[in-house]
Image (cartoon, coloured by chain):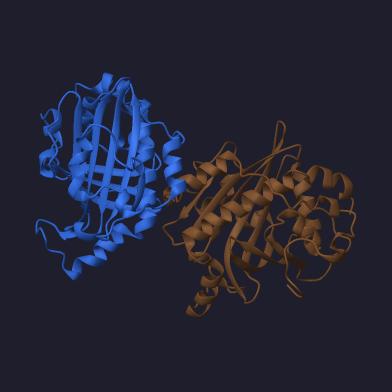
Chain colours: A brown, B blue
Amino acid sequence: MTGDLYLGYRNDDADTPFAKFFKPEMAALPQHVVEALQHGPQGGMALLAFDDAATVADEGYHQTENGYGILQDGSFQVSVRTDMPGVTPAMWVWWFGWHGCDTRRYKLWHPRAHLSAAWKDGDDAGRRGNQRYLGRWSMISEYIGSAMLNAAIQFVAPAALGLPADSDDAVTICARLGSGDAPVDVGWFVHHIRSTPGGSEMRSRFWMGGPHIEVRKAPGVASKAVRPIAARVLGNRAATARNLLVHCAQEMNHLAGFLAELHQNFGDE
Amino acid sequence: MTGDLYLGYRNDDADTPFAKFFKPEMAALPQHVVEALQHGPQGGMALLAFDDAATVADEGYHQTENGYGILQDGSFQVSVRTDMPGVTPAMWVWWFGWHGCDTRRYKLWHPRAHLSAAWKDGDDAGRRGNQRYLGRWSMISEYIGSAMLNAAIQFVAPAALGLPADSDDAVTICARLGSGDAPVDVGWFVHHIRSTPGGSEMRSRFWMGGPHIEVRKAPGVASKAVRPIAARVLGNRAATARNLLVHCAQEMNHLAGFLAELHQNFGDE
């Protein structure tokens, strides 16, 4: 979040062994995402309630695998699936640890929207597996639609949301999402990645706004003072939900296109 | 509108002879609907004026068969066509009478959005043909987009809007649409269904808001007091128009996929 914010690589940004994976062209949205956008906002009861977050680890699929809408509690919810041939769940565990310490790595993920990433603790030594992101805060700047977001992504253990521990066949990335500028949290997300015959699939779930707005580290506290800060992060609910669906689909599909090769080259770092 | 509202079938809801027609998966939107969504709101003069509603029964087609937009009088208008091979106009006359007395029947129509249906008069005996819905009020709860709507659908004779009486080749379902919670009406709709070589086509027309907001049974009266109630039903005009187009296209295409078989099994009820 410090220094110049700009999209893409400039000057000596490309002087890294991984720079060849910076691909400014992004693939078209998958047809199932296009259809979800065409349908527009869904009825709240057709969407996943936050209290049922852990069911993303169940076999089978939810009623709405791809879609967005506003829930009765005033929050908005987004769900999207990413099919990832040739990608394993473990590669994502590696990615969530590896990318966070370097803006140039973060930009590989979404070349049209990612601006900056750094660990809040500034530390990048010696950790492995999901210990590399669990309990840490990734401070990022990115566009969601046209809105620039400074966010604190606070990774938590899957158990915090009732999800099973990671295994070879399935892993879950869970985080509390808040403002990067003020101690206000606004949402949660879960990316559940499970093996499929040809690779894996990621099923992403976001809950934003409504009861998820809290003063950070003061659960249950949502004083009037934090509402303007939350509103700035969240924007118009239906519009932000739609833009978040597009953003997530873009970045996950884009990275999945070369994650296996990236991991093969840098998986030991 | 009484009792628990929930999507889909639960517990013993499926203990009916028609439950096998409850199909949670809905088909993709027809291409002509997708194109209408891509175009977005149309100029008011390209859309059908309420005073010209009766022209939906004329031969040929309107300038806008699929589209939505805001008219100069402040109302919003939605038009959409549903192609229905193997379906006859008479099957729709049967459907509009048959479904209204049972939430489980109503849910067949739009499994992702329909919550509840009942006749206001509570009566379901002995009527036939369009006498089964004409002059009656269907009290429904459904989602339009993410917004839950409690509505009173007040069916009127086609002649009330200048349309010809039903025939073997063409029928028209006409209704005044209002709040289910307060005596405030907000719109009108017409579904004109006519025979085609392979079945039939439905051409739906909605007019909502603007001059169509009235205190119920007090034509011409639209006191300031009813505006907040109408606004709650109507939401953001352009967004609701879009969501209504999607909703109508979904439910009509979905039901048309099995209406002939449903009618064959239950057409005598």
Q: Residue at x 47, y 78 (%)?
A: A224
Q: Tell me where residue B251 appears, x and y as whole percent.
A: 35, 37
| Viewer can see residue A80 | yes
Asked whether B64 or B207 is in front, the reply is B64
Relative to the observer, which residue lies in front, B30 or B254? B30
In the rendered view, does A222 fall on the left or right side of B239? right
> In this image, B228 relative to A179: left or right?
left
- Residue shown at 58%/47% (left/top)? A80
Quick check: B247 above or below A70? above
Q: Position of residue A231 (x, y in %)?
A: 51, 71
- Horizontally, residue A89 falls left or right of residue A79, namely right
- Which residue is at a point 47% across and 58% down the rendered structure image? A238
Q: Residue at image x 47%, y 53%? A: A69
At which x and y percent is residue A84? 70, 40
Q: Quadrant of the C terminus of chain A?
A: bottom right
Q: Quadrant of residue B252?
A: top left
Where the N terminus of chain A falls, by quadrant?
bottom right
State how many labels appear. Answer: 0
Q: Is residue B138 visible?
A: no
Left of A30 or right of it: where is B32? left
Q: Where residue B42 appears, x then y in whole percent?
A: 37, 52
